[in-house]
Amino acid sequence: MRVPFSADSLAEAMARRPVVLLGEVHDNLAQHAVRADALRSLLRSGARPAIAFEQFDRGQQALLDRARSEVLPTGVDRVDHMIARAGGGAAAPGWRWDLYRPYLRLAIEYDLPIVAANLSRRDAMRVAEQGFDAAFGATTITEVGLDRLPEELLRAQQHAVDIGHCGLMPPSMFPSLARAQIARDVALAQAIRPYLEQGVVLLAGNGHVRNDIGVPYFLTTEQRARSVSIGLVESGGESAEEEPAHFDMAMLTPAQPREDPCAMLRKRVPPSGG
C-alpha cells in the first residue's frame, strides 16, 4: 500500500500498529525530517513506544544508558554526550549523527526507552566468516530457524547483497555477506522483542524492515500481526516501482542528491569478472 509522503500521513501509518518497523535511506535528509515530525505527532497523541536504533550496536546499551543518566556539567548537551559515549561521535564511520539527534531528543523529552539494537560490525564479520554460532547461542539458532533457512530467503538476501554492492562483489562472497545481513536482522528482532507489548519504533534501513527477508521474517505470526513495516523509497531509482511491494506500507520520497555510490565503490573494488 502506498501512502503520500508527508508527516501527517506517516504519523497515521505509524499509529496503526504498536510495533513500527520504520525504514529509511540513511542519508536522505527529507526522509529524516518527515520521520522526526511524524514521530513527534505520534508521541503527542499519547503513544509511548520504545525507540530502537540500528545505529547503536547492542553491546553499546550499557554505555548508552550510563550516558543518559550521568550528571553532566553545565552546557554539555545530553544527546551529544550520548552519541559521543555510545556512538563514537562525529569520528565514527558510517552514520550521520546529526540526522539521528532529533529522535534521541524526542526519546529523552518523552522519557522513552532507547534501545541499542544492531549487531556490531565485528560480530557480523565473525558470522560471515564462521557462521551464525559466532554471534548466537544454540537456543536462538533453533528458535528462529537459522539452522534451516529456506533457499528462497538465502537467494533473495544474496541478490540484495549483489545489488547493494553494485554487482562488484564476486559471487563466491554472496553467501557470507548475506549471512551477516541475516544475523543483523535477527539481532534487531531480538532487540525489539522486550518492547512488543509496550510498543516500539525501530529505526533502520529499508532492507532491514522488508517483509520477505528482514526483521518481520524473524517475528512470530502473533508478533507480525501487531507490527507494520513502512518503507521510505527514493523516487527515480531503478527499484522505485518494485521495492514498495516489500513493505506493508511504502512512501515514495525525493531522492537525496549524492555522488554515485557505485562509482565510488568501483574505485576501491575491481570488477569481479562474473
Image: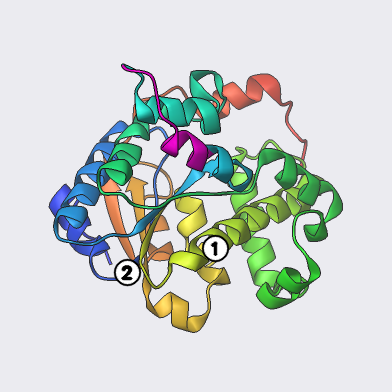
* Amino acid type at image mark 1: Ala
Which secondary structure, mark 1?
helix
Q: Position of residue 3 (x, y in %)?
A: 21, 59
How packed mark 2 is, by other alpha carbons closer than 10 Å (few <14, some 14-19, many 20 or more), is many
- Of residues 42 and 46, the one nearer the viewer is 46
Query: Which residue lies most toward the bottom here?
Result: 222
Question: Which comes sooner in the sequence, label 1 or label 2?
Answer: 2
- Check disc 1 and report the residue beneath it: 189
Residue 114 as seen in the image, left or right of residue 60: left
Among the 4 quarters of the image, the one containing residue 142: bottom right
> So how many labels did they put on this image?
2
Residue 251 as seen in the image, left or right of residue 167: left
Which residue is at 39% across, 79% downward? 225
Residue 94 as seen in the image, left or right of residue 79: right
Compared with 195, 143 (above or below) is: below
- Check disc 2 and report the residue beneath it: 18
* Label number found at residue 229: none
Which residue is at 30% across, 71% downward? 17
Q: From which residue to which does the magenta span run?
A: 64-74
Which residue is at 25% across, 48% downward? 110
